[in-house]
Every structure is written in structure tokens, then in C-alpha cells.
């Protein structure tokens, strides 16, 4: 498995989304600790220690898995063969033979091993070697946003004056309250941040659900959309092929050693197939 020299996305769109994601996470953490926490805790008691440890663990796993995802090369260049092997195909753009389940990405301009999709927020294609980092980072983003919303919503509702139809309108469309003069600038910032978190949470939860379903079936998103279910080998084997041999430990740290089966000449995910 090769490593990339640069972790910065190439395209303008990907760079903007990458910057928003990387800056948005610390903004949420900073807001919760500097403005929400003092509202409920006068001193740094055991509950604050518990919240701090939980936030640190979640944030660490998000950034660490994103770093490993960005660093990992999933291109098919290092496994290309001069001979067109059974099940392989020729990519006219890359001018090389590539393994089954590989696809050419027009954004990355290369063929990706076991291509799942191109992630705009990282500027990377998710594939054979970095899927574990994407799934775990997405899991902790979803968990972290849910945790943040659970912690912040009572604070926002209290500032709005309790739960009623008007406050619900403020939380769903905070700009209306600002334009009508019903909320001040600070309350607008609080409700807007809460709304952004809610929207991103549902987006992450949806993407996570899709990834988990695909992993359980040993499918890529392309195969899922085209109804291809020829690589399933049972739930446990499917999880190993997506997350590696230590699939149950990768949730703790991206530096947990968990090699995926085969090296793309071992046919672990390419040739041995079984119709479900």
C-alpha cells in the first residue's frame, strides 16, 4: 500500500469543502466548551472531565482517520499488469489493465482499486485501501454531531425562551427571526450553528447507513446502484474485506494494524465470488 506525498485536495471545489470540514469541527468544539459548558458547569467537575474526554476521543478519531485517508494511495497503478488477466479490463484513459471492481475517476484522473465513490470533502476516492478510514471517520462525525446537538439544543432553546412554534421557526429558519428583529446577532449565530449541525448530522447519518449496508453486502456504491451482489461471502468475511482482519478494533484508532485480505493479486475481493 503506497502513501501519497500531498494530502491537500487538488480541485477548487474539493479544497473549499475540505477547508469547511476541517475548520467546522473545531468551531463546534470551541463553541460547546466556551459558551455552552459554562452555562451548566460552574467548575471543572467530573462531568466536565467526562465531556472533555469524550470530545477529545471523538475529535482525535475524526482527524486521525481523515489524515490516514488522505495519505493512502488507492490507485491501481502499482498493481497494473501488462497481461490482461481473467476478469481484468483495459482502461483506455490510463492505458493499462486494471483489476475487477476498479473504475476510472474523472476527478482524480486515475483508476481506483475497488472504487466506491469520490468524496468531495476530502478530494479523494474511497476504495480498497482507505475505506476503513472513511467509514470510521464518518461514524465519529455522526456520533460527534449527535452528541453536540444533544448537549447544545437545551442551551439554544433556553435562550429562545422555551419550546414553542415560534422557537421552532427560529431554529429551522433563523434568518427570519433576524430580519424581523425577533432575535439579536448572537442568538442568530447560535441557532444558525445548531441548524447547520442538524443538516450535516442527517447527511452523515445517511452516508454512514449507505456505507454500512454496502460493507455488509460487500458492495461498492456503484454495485449497489446497479444491483450487483456477486461478491458477498457472509457478514464476517465482508466486514474483513472492507475494514481488514481486525475489523472490530479499527474503531479505536486508525493506527490499529488491520490489513485487508489479499494484495489485489491474491483474488480476495476480485475473483472468488458467490451469488447470494
Image (cartoon, rainbow, N blue to C red):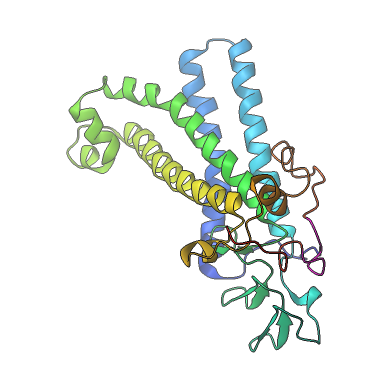
Kindly identify the residue that appears in the image at 62 percent across and 63 percent down.
124
Residue 64, horizontal then vertical, whole percent: 71, 45
Q: Decide whether residue 74 is among the magenta residues.
A: no
Residue 100, horizontal then vertical, whole percent: 67, 73
Q: In the drawing, does residue 97 fall left or right of residue 201?
A: right
Front-most of residues 275 and 245 = 275
Compared to 82, does 232 lie above or below?
A: above
Quarter the N terminus occupies: bottom right
Front-most of residues 177 and 142 = 142
Magenta stretch, main secondary structure, is loop
Q: Quadrant of residue 80?
A: bottom right
Magenta range: 261-267
Kindly identify the residue that appears in the image at 73 percent across and 83 percent down.
97
Quarter the C terminus occupies: bottom right
Front-most of residues 275 and 12 = 275
Q: Quadrant of residue 49?
A: top right
Q: Decide whether residue 264 is among the magenta residues.
A: yes
Residue 192, horizontal then vertical, whole percent: 36, 40
Q: In the drawing, does residue 275 fall left or right of residue 113?
A: left
Residue 15, horizontal then vertical, whole percent: 56, 63
- Is residue 44 shown to the viewer in this render? no
Amino acid at each position: 500500500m503506497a502513501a501519497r506525498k500531498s494530502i491537500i485536495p487538488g480541485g477548487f471545489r474539493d479544497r473549499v469543502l475540505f477547508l469547511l470540514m476541517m475548520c467546522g469541527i473545531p468551531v463546534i468544539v470551541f463553541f460547546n466548551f466556551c459558551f455552552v459548558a459554562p452555562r451548566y458547569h460552574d467548575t471543572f467537575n467530573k462531568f466536565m472531565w467526562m465531556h472533555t474526554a469524550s470530545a477529545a476521543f471523538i475529535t482525535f478519531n475524526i482527524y486521525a482517520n481523515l489524515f490516514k485517508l488522505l495519505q493512502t494511495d488507492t490507485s491501481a497503478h502499482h498493481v497494473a499488469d501488462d497481461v490482461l488477466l481473467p476478469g481484468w479490463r483495459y482502461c483506455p484513459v490510463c492505458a493499462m489493465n486494471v483489476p475487477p471492481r476498479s473504475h476510472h475517476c474523472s476527478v482524480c484522473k486515475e483508476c481506483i482499486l475497488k472504487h466506491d465513490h469520490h468524496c468531495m470533502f476530502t478530494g479523494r476516492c474511497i476504495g480498497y485501501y482507505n475505506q476503513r478510514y472513511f467509514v470510521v471517520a464518518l461514524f465519529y462525525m455522526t456520533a460527534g454531531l449527535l452528541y453536540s446537538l444533544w448537549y447544545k439544543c437545551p442551551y439554544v432553546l433556553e435562550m429562545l425562551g422555551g419550546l414553542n412554534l415560534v422557537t421552532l421557526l427560529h431554529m429551522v429558519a433563523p434568518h427570519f427571526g433576524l430580519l424581523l428583529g425577533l432575535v439579536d446577532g448572537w442568538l442568530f449565530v447560535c441557532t444558525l450553528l445548531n441548524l447547520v449541525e442538524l443538516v450535516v448530522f442527517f447527511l452523515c447519518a445517511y452516508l454512514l447507513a449507505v456505507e454500512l449496508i454496502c460493507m455488509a453486502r460487500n458492495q461498492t456504491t456503484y454495485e449497489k446502484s446497479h444491483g450487483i451482489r456477486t461478491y458477498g461471502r457472509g457478514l464476517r468475511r465482508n466486514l474483513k474485506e472492507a475494514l481488514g482482519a481486525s475489523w472490530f478494533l479499527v474503531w479505536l484508532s486508525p493506527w490499529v494494524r488491520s490489513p485487508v485480505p489479499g494484495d489485489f493479486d491474491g483474488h480476495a475481493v476480485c475473483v472468488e465470488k458467490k451469488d447470494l
